[in-house]
Image: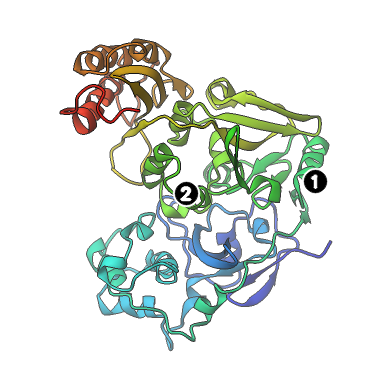
Amino acid sequence: MPDPQVTVNGLPRPLAGVPAHTNALDFVRGLGLTGAKEGCAEGECGACAVLVARPDGDGSRWAPVNACLVPALALDGQEVVTAEGLGSPEALHPVQSGLAEVGGSQCGYCTPGFVCSLAAEYYRPDRVPGPDGFDVHAIGGNLCRCTGYRPIRDAGRALGAPATDDPLLARQDRPAPPPVATRAEGFARPADLADALALLAEHPEATVVAGSTDWGVEANLRGRRAAYVVAVDRVPELREVTRGDRGIEIGSALTLSEVEAALGDEVPLLAQVWPQFASRLIRNGATIGGNLATASPIGDLAPALLALEARLVLASADGEREVGLADFFTGYRETVLRPAELIRAIRVPTPLSARTTFRKIAKRRFDDISSVAVAVALDVTDGTVVRARIGLGGVAATPLRAIATEAALEGRSWDADTVEAASAVLAGEGTPIDDQRASAAYRSAMLGNALRAWWAEDWAGESAGEGSP
């Protein structure tokens, strides 16, 4: 097996001897590429953003990621571009010159990260040049502490089309680098699922990482070190979306951005979640399986998948088993996963419920942790609720189903009186606590208001059965 290496700004850089816990940010700064900075070490500020070539159909795309979270060894065989690789003081990249022209940089600490996020937007294949074609959420994961966002936004809105001879644009016409098997001291990237399961059987104490958006924070801020790391982010069998009689099966190692692109509006409830889930930088790294395996009680994805009655396919060297997501979480940050077992796929049963909603209560509308999250999937026939599924986050030690509220809805007329009665039940679900994000009383109140708000926004004025199948 060849020694690991990564291409950075067009040059091969050896990774041999790099410790398993060294992140990509420290690695590139060690190369003298000090544009990327450590601002928060947890994926909140985007000062560390770099570009990575990712698969996109028959070609590739430049995806910005938080370098502070990605293990350097996880970039073996990959192509990375930092702000220095986009342009130089003598020959600025159009994004860099655009920021300079509108005064989009003051202290400059955050600027290279903004440059990389804006560059990814600049090269987005379906972007229409001009103010209306700029997606402001492209920089939603980048924090500026002194300039203010208007000039930075103006720089993005003023971006034209890349020149036809732009080498980074041309690079997107070729496939992204294929995954490569990696072995290093304390670190392995398996070649396929069988290799991954064999590694986990050999190292049952191993820490499984994919996007490392959770483990990277533990390593950076709490000094956690893994005895052995198995990176499954590029395992082919974990990166597929299939559709069949049992529903939609989503590979656990697909990033949230990849799942979003693959599903589009096919699962409307998930389509409501993605824009509210962290930032594009995080969604480009975080995987759907990793998000569930962390078992966070305040994750946004679990409530939606609970409302969809998702099931998990768990794999080990001994075979596969399937569990309902509602039975997967056993306690705070605890699951039914056994040693040497991983999530292979998430199954979403079809047909889907006709009406769904996702309500996230947080201090900021975007890029924030939930205080409370409520997902509802409802089927109404001839004015009667025939099926209700409700997933909750932020109100207990685990994500959970609102079983009592579901029972209060099913078999009853879907009208304002039923909504009010069910809302009173919903306010009593879970065991909310007081913490820095919200009080227990506030969380209960927000639970109770979730159905009321949905009724007022989407149903009031309709007759009970109107628009129902």
Q: Quadrant of the C terminus?
A: top left
Dot 1 lies on which element? helix
Tell me if residue 348 comes above or below residue 154 in the rendering. Answer: above
Circle 1 packing at 10 Å, graded few (<14), some (14-19), many (20+), is some
Q: Tell me, what colour scheme is on the image? A: rainbow
Residue topped by disc 2: 260
Residue 347: % across, % down:
58, 34
Q: Is residue 287 left or right of residue 444?
A: right
In this orientation, which residue lies closer to the viewer: 436 or 54? 54
Q: Residue furthest left?
A: 461
Query: Mark 2 Cα within 10 Å, few/some/many (few <14, many 20+)?
Result: some
- Report which quarter residue 27 is drawn in: bottom right
Inspect this view and state whether residue 191 appears.
yes
Q: Amino acid at mark 2?
A: Glu
Q: Specify whether residue 341 is in view.
A: no
Amino acid under label 1?
A: Asp
